[in-house]
Every structure is written in structure tokens, then in C-alpha cells.
Amino acid sequence: MNTLRKLIIAGLLVWLPLAATIIIVKLVIDVLDKTILLLPPEFRPENVLGISIPGFGVILAVAVLLFTGIFAANFFGHQLVSFWENMVGRIPLVRSIYTSVKQVSTTLLSTDSNSFRKVVLVEYPRRGIWSMGFLTNKGLPAACKLSGETLISVFVPTTPNPTSGFIVMMPEQDVRALDMTVEEGFKFIISMGVIIPEDSELLQQSVAELAQGDNAS
């Protein structure tokens, strides 16, 4: 029975990741393929060529994004986008939603941003307990002024769902940067600590040194 169980588990370990990958990729492609509905019916491939082209909507979506980026990057397009954002900014409810999404998108997608570019270790929720988080930004100026310290904002995600978590503002000297990529950090969190980064010895050594330093003090 143990041999049979191991064989079944081995089979699942092959098929489950493959099936999940296929489902997710298919879902993304299906969503992007809906972009073809932006074309008038008379210009769609099935009406022009007489056949339906699978994935044509994906090509169209990439083309729309590319040309939008080219347009927004030039002076005229930048002015038009600014005019559009000013118009949207005058609509009460829409303004809040648009501004929030715009700020988050800019923070996450901008290559110049330092947000979510560094994995850190913080003592949370209390001293002696270490939690992995992601450096997001500098702390709120008002909070820094009240505390009298330089604070930085750290997002501490929950496991196995890293889309929820806590924002904590920590003194800069209490935040320890880890020598690992953001991808490795997310893998560690999503796997509930099962997937250890390749530099796990360095991570464990860092935690041990910090613990010894706290005990000595």
C-alpha cells in the first residue's frame, strides 16, 4: 500500500503543476482573445478571410498595448493622457478608483521604483519572531515626525495567499535586507516555507546572528 501511495503521489506531482499551468495560461489567453470583440464584425478574420484564427485576439491585444505605449511616450500623447486624467479627476467616485489603481500600477510596474524590489526580515508581530516582508516605501512623514525616527513601510504578506497581509512601519535600523530575489520570497511564502531558496544557509545564518545579537543585548 505504501508503494502504491508513493506512486500515486509521484503521478500527482507530475500532473498537478502541468494541469494548473495549462489552465492558467488558457485563462489568460482566453481573456486576451476577447480583445477581438473591439473590432467591428465586418473586420473580424472570420468575416474577412472566412476562417477563425485562434489567438488573433492575443496578437491584437499586444498590438494595442504596444501602439498605446508608443503614443503615450511622445509629447502629443503625453499631453492627451494628462488632459484625460484631469477630466477623470473631476468625477468624484471614478477619481478615487482611477487614482488608486494608477498609483499602484505605477509603483509595481515602474522600473525606477524601489517598491517590491527588496525582500526584508522584520521582527513581527513581536520581538523574537521573524517575518518575511517586502520593502514598499518610506514611512508616512507624519508617522516619522511623531515617532522621531526614520520609518520605512514594509508589507508583511500572509501565507499561502500573499495578496493579503499587513503594512507595518518599522525603524529603518530594525529592517534587515535579505540576499534573495522577490520571486524567491514569494515562493517561500506561498509554499508556507516548504520551498527554501538556494541561499537558505545564508538566510539561516543571518537570522542566527540577529538572534545572538538580541540575546547579547
Image: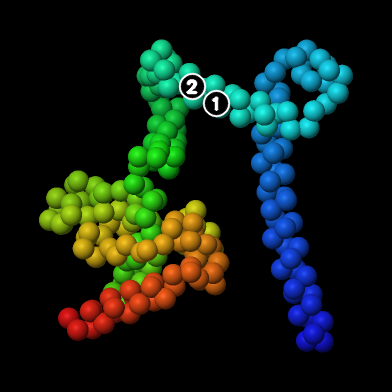
Q: CA distance from mark 1 to mark 2?
A: 6 Å
Q: Is residue 47 visible?
A: yes
Residues packed near mark 1 inside 10 Å, few (<14), some (14 to 19) or many (20 plus): few
Q: Residue furthest bottom?
A: 1
**What's the amino acid at mark 2?**
Ile
Residue at 54 percent of width and 72 percent of height: 194
- Relative to 141, is 114 on the left or the right? right
Question: x, y percentage for residue 43?
Answer: 75, 14
Question: x, y percentage for residue 95?
Answer: 41, 27
Residue under label 1, please give it. Answer: 66
Between 97 and 186, the residue placed more toward the observer is: 186
Question: x, y percentage for residue 50?
Answer: 87, 19
Between 194 and 160, the residue placed more toward the observer is: 194
Residue at 72 percent of width and 62 percent of height: 16
Q: Secondary structure at mark 1?
A: helix
Residue at 29 percent of width and 78 percent of height: 209
Where residue 11 sits, quadrant-wise, is: bottom right
- Relative to 50, is 109 on the left or the right? left
Q: Is residue 159 above or below residue 21?
A: below
Q: Is residue 190 above or below residue 210?
A: above
Where residue 39 sits, quadrant-wise, is: top right
Q: Quadrant of the N terminus?
A: bottom right
Residue under label 2, please give it. Answer: 70
Q: Looking at the image, do the residues carrying marks 1 and 2 touch, with CB atoms under 8 Å apart?
A: yes
Residues packed near mark 2 inside 10 Å, few (<14), some (14 to 19) or many (20 plus): few
Label annotation for residue 193: none
Q: Is residue 96 visible?
A: no
Question: x, y percentage for residue 36?
Answer: 71, 25
Between 184 and 194, the residue placed more toward the observer is: 184
